[in-house]
Amino acid sequence: MRLITLLGIVMVLPPVLLGLGGCGEHRQDAGTPTTTVETPTAAIAVIAPIAGFTGSGTVRFSEDPQGLHVVADVAGFHPGKHGIHIHEYGDLSAVDLSGLGSHFNPTGQEHGAPGDHPHHAGDLGNLIIGDDGQGHLDEVVPGLSLSGPTSIIGRSVVIHENMDDLTSQPAGNSGKRIAAAVIGIAKP
């Protein structure tokens, strides 16, 4: 409580009316917005190619009781199978995408097919591109989430030039990283 004198009248005003938030408490500066951190319900990655390659699209993520539901829709890639993975980092600054690190692997497993044991949490298998250059992937991947230690938020999705053989260590022998995106929280 503070004593204020106004026109000779002594007034006792509670700290809240003075914008102080209480004695001994941290006060918020005027104009500083407050935010509440909520658990995301969906995430998105907007795929773009590196120089010399074509292809674009989106990868959407949502929570599922069995893991994370992943839906990829892309166009403009050359036909065939392309390895697709979630990588550790969201650093797109290197032209060869090397800043994205290795496959996301919070439990220290060997590389493998999604759904098999063992596999990296970030192993999504192969994206099959048709003769029209379009591809679609729709799967639920155990071991991934949108929050906590297995969160994919801020990490990246990478599409590789070749097929992931699902067995070679450490990354499936899927070749060059030709397209990628950082995974962000999707607008509800």
Image: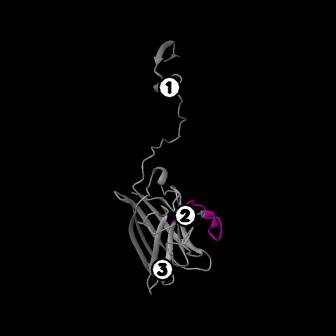
**Residue that sits furthest to the bottom in the current view:** 131
Question: Which residue lies under the disc numbered 3?
Answer: 81
| Residue at (64% x, 71% y) in the render | 96
Where residue 145 sits: x, y (%)?
43, 56
Q: CA distance from mark 2 to mark 3?
A: 18 Å
| Sequence-earlier tag: 2 or 3 | 3
> Does residue 170 appear to the left or right of 36 in the view shown?
right
Where residue 92 sits: x, y (%)?
61, 64
Specify start and end residues of the magenta stretch as a single range: 86-99
Q: CA distance from mark 3 to mark 1?
A: 65 Å
Kind of residue indicated by mark 2: His
Q: CA distance from mark 2 to mark 1?
A: 53 Å
Q: Which callout, 3 or 1, points to the residue nearer the camera?
A: 3
- Nearer to me, 12 or 102: 102
**SS state under label 2:** loop
Q: Is residue 24 magenta?
A: no
- Nearer to me, 23 or 179: 179
Question: Which residue lies under the disc numbered 1?
Answer: 18
| Residue at (57% x, 60% y) in the render | 90
Kind of residue indicated by mark 3: Lys
Where residue 56 sits: x, y (%)?
50, 75
The main secondary structure of the magenta stretch is loop
**SS state under label 3:** strand
Classify 67 as above or below 165: above
